[in-house]
Image (cartoon, rainbow, N blue to C red):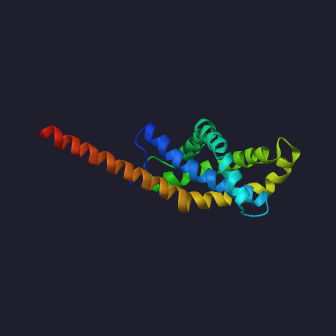
Amino acid sequence: MENCMPRNGKEGLVYGGVICALTCIFMATLNISIHMGGVSRDAIVISLKSFPLVFIIAMILEASIVGKIADKLVNVFISPTDSLNAHIMFRTFFTVIGMSIIMTIVGGILASGFSLEVIKEFPIHWPRNFCTAIFLELIIVQPIARTAMRRMHQNQEKYQTNSENNSIN
């Protein structure tokens, strides 16, 4: 199971980038489509255009605020002897709570500007965003990111084996 998780900072950035990219594109498309009355070509175009900004905001927020808080909360609820799956589940849960709160506000601001509407609509939009994001993370995004890590590690091991074999010859 360890083969599916990042082993260093570079791999952590790739892993986090995959998770963030998939989640951002799906959640942005969902929220924009809802605001525009349904999935349409225009909603998808707006989602794709807004993706770079939303992705950068999400990566910065996760790395600087939400991830640190999630790690502290995981340490409160999980012991080092608990399974990797327990760590993944709790980390995902706490990260999704934080990111869905912040990104619901950021998304509202990007859609409507700084207005009272963003605060008024928060109790309606956040539960939907949280439920959608947690489902998306657990069923689709996390398995894809862990598969990417597994393949990255397999490629590294192949490369290392080939390098060792070539140096012997």
- Residue at (68, 52) in percent of width and height: 47
Q: Horizontal and vertical percent for residue 104?
A: 73, 49
Q: Residue at x 29, y 47 (%)?
A: 157
Residue 105 is situated, as x and y percent measured from the top left of the image, at 76, 46
Looking at the rendered image, the quarter that the C terminus falls into is top left
Quadrant where the N terminus is found in the figure: bottom left
Outermost residue on the right side: it is 116
155 vs 65, nearest the viewer = 155
User: Is residue 10 in view?
Assistant: yes
Residue that sits furthest to the top in the current view: 64
Q: Position of residue 103 (x, y in %)?
A: 70, 47
In this image, 98 relative to 115: left or right? Answer: left
Q: Is residue 2 visible?
A: no
Residue 67, image x, y percentages:
58, 41
Determine the residue positioned at 44% across, 42% down. 11
Residue in the picture at 28% in, 44% down: 159
Q: Is residue 152 left or right of residue 48?
A: left
